[in-house]
Image (cartoon, rainbow, N blue to C red):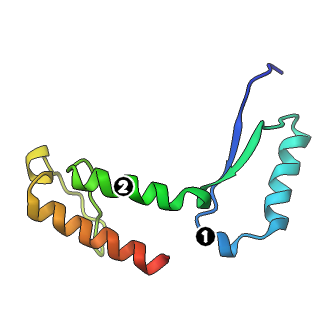
């Protein structure tokens, strides 16, 4: 096996529900396969940073928070995404979503 530096990231989007047994099991499986990561990180360690980056993208009109209750295929062009009311609405919904899960 080639020697490469790697980082293993656990996608623990709900850290309270993750058990150490589950984490250890995945890590042991990787070792068994012959892969030892240089370091291990957890998604939950970066939630606040990721949230702040998402807010910046929304404010810049480069992202939006979907608040539709059902899946609807929609097409937005760059001009619509940059409308102040659209950005405000998206930021409002994203912020409330964040507050609900913090």
63 over 18 or under it: above or below: above
* Disc 2 target residue: 54
Q: Residue at x 10, y 65 (%)?
A: 85
Which quarter of the picture shows residue 33? top right
> Which mark, residue 2?
none
Q: In what element is the residue under mark 1? A: loop
Mark 1 vs mark 2: which is more N-terminal?
Answer: 1
- Left or right: residue 46 versus residue 60 is right
Residue 7 position within the rendered picture, expressed as x and y whole percent measured from the top left: 69, 39
Q: How many marks?
A: 2
Q: In the depicted view, which residue is nearer to us: 52 or 13?
A: 52
Q: In what element is the residue under mark 2? A: helix
Q: Residue at x 61, y 70 (%)?
A: 14
Q: Are marks 1 and 2 in contact (CB under 8 Å)?
A: no
Q: Residue at x 25, y 64 (%)?
A: 72
Q: Residue at x 83, y 35 (%)?
A: 35
Estimate the spatial distance between the alpha carbons at disc 1 and disc 2, rounded to whole Å. Answer: 18 Å
- Left or right: residue 60 versus residue 48 is left
- Left or right: residue 44 versus residue 37 is left
Local packing at callout 2 (Cα closer than 10 Å; few below 14, some 14-19, many 20+) is some
**Which label lies toward us, 1 or 2?**
2
Residue 12 position within the rendered picture, expressed as x and y whole percent measured from the top left: 64, 62
* Disc 1 target residue: 14
């Amino acid at each position: 096996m080639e020697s490469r530096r790697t980082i293993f990231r656990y996608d623990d989007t709900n850290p309270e529900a993750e058990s150490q047994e589950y984490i250890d099991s995945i890590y042991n499986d990787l070792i068994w396969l012959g892969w030892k990561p240089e370091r291990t990180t957890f998604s939950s360690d970066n939630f606040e940073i990721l949230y702040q980056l998402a807010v910046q993208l929304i404010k810049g009109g480069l992202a939006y928070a979907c608040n539709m209750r059902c899946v609807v295929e929609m097409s937005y062009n760059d001009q619509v995404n940059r409308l102040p009311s659209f950005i405000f609405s998206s930021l409002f919904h994203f912020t409330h979503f964040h507050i609900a899960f913090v």
